[in-house]
Image: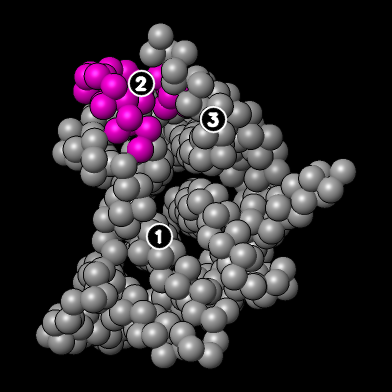
Amino acid sequence: MIFQDALRSLRKDAGRAFFYWLTFVLTAMFIFLFLNIAMSEAVGVTFVNTANTDIATNVAMILIVICVVEILFANDFYVRSKARELAVRLVCGATYMQLAQYLLIQTFILLAAAIPFGIIASLMLIPLINTVLHHVILSSFTVAIVPKAVILTAVILIGVIFWATYLNLAFAYRHSAAGMMNETSLKLQGSSMVNTGKPLSRIRQILAVVLTVVPLVLFYVNPDGIILSSLIGLTGISGILTRILIPLLSDYIDRKKPDQPMIMAGVGFMRTDIAILKWNILLLLITSIFLASVLISASDPQEIMLVLLSYIVMNVMLSLAIMFRYSTELQSRFRYYRSLEQIGFMHEDQKSIIRLEVTGLYGIILAVMLLYIGNIFLALVLDHRMSAANAGMLTVFYLIPLILCCLLTMHYYSQAVLLQPVKEGQAGGR
């Protein structure tokens, strides 16, 4: 009975389930690809000799942790979006253990379907990566298939799923059925949405600005402390997003409300997007900073190749993760756009709102990223630890995934909230 209900729920909520599944596919693809590179004979990571603390081992362990964190982020958002469904089951007499089984079945089904796709995608990428290594980067390193990587990938992901199920149960246990009925409130609560109606502490705002700006100076004073300085800066950026930017957007909406309703709607949606995506943005930033700092300290060609590939693939993966989570949220915007249509917003007006929201959101993400990544690369170039050409190449690898995700998000957004009602109207006319 629980198994059938879980399958029925997946079919009913196919959109969110699809993006959750894509997160699994992308994570499985990266972990399998990365393990094949790290566990090759040339690199030699075994995960057995704990005394081995070389760069390759440290990078392997940290990136696997980042992949795990990304799955937990996606899982948290997925479960919060299903809070109403969980509340109904609790009201109908389900126990917390039954809820755990219900969620475990869903996530395990998605995982079982994702692992083969992820591994197949990795196998298809390996020849392309080897071609780039041999003919573009002129490296003799060859990515080979390591059978143990398949088992280790499955073990890592299955372990994450059971841990995620425990967190899901804790989520249901912490919230009453009545509290879980308000999905929007729960999603914003989980993303640290600020109540802009309360007066903000000026001291906290100033502290957030100081914690953001001081690391930018430290990059030039002490290039060896990039990671530590960046961790301090992340605290400041988190405070700026939550305590300064979101309230400023709220004030802007209040000023524009009478005469520019399209700007008001676009900025209002953007404010919600920032609250929901804040932790994904911070994860992308710290991952790129970590890999960039490790890259300049690597000396062995195989280690350099491992870190460079990790830098490129992780930027792509985490940019797509932002897009997937954003796209999942966009599915709930359909009713808002129908309301806008009913009060007089034409089709072109709604497209303008979408362009304003998406370009504004990704513009903020790019600005935050370039603020830190750009200054880090500039400090390294001035300290003669990185060439200007390499800094430019790494910046391009950082920008392209986000720009492509911005374009794809805008296309999907229009498909989700604009084209569907047109088709319905045509069907009704027939």
Q: Earlier in the sequence, mark 3 or mark 2?
A: 3
Q: Secondary structure at mark 1?
A: helix
Q: Three-letter amino acid code at disc 3?
A: Lys
222, 211: nearer the viewer: 211
Q: Amino acid at mark 2?
A: Tyr
- Confirm whether residue 219 shows in the render: no
The residue range painted magenta reads: 84-111
Between circles 1 and 2, the one closer to the viewer is: 2
Crowding at label 1, few (<14), some or many (≥20) Cα neighbours within 10 Å?
A: some
Residue 102 numbered mark, or none: 2
In the structure shown, which secondary structural element does the residue marked by tag 3 occupy? helix
In this view, 160 is above or below 384: above
Q: How is the image coloured?
A: one colour
- Residue at image location 48% in from the left, 88% down from the top: 258
* Residue at the image point whose x is 50% and y is 19% from the top: 7
Q: Residue at x 71, y 53 (%)?
A: 421
Mark 3 and mark 1: Cα distance apart in space: 25 Å
Residue with the mark numbered 1 = 277
Where does residue 332 sit, x and y in percent of width and height?
Answer: 51, 51
Which numbered disc covers residue 12? 3
Q: How many marks?
A: 3
Res 195 label? none
Q: Is residue 181 magenta?
A: no
Measure the alpha-carbon separation of dots 1 and 2.
Answer: 27 Å
Give the quarter of the figure containing the C terminus: top right
Q: Quadrant of the N terminus?
A: top left
Name the outermost residue toward the top: 1
Horizontally, residue 12 falls left or right of residue 286, namely right
Q: Residue at x 35, y 64 (%)?
A: 275
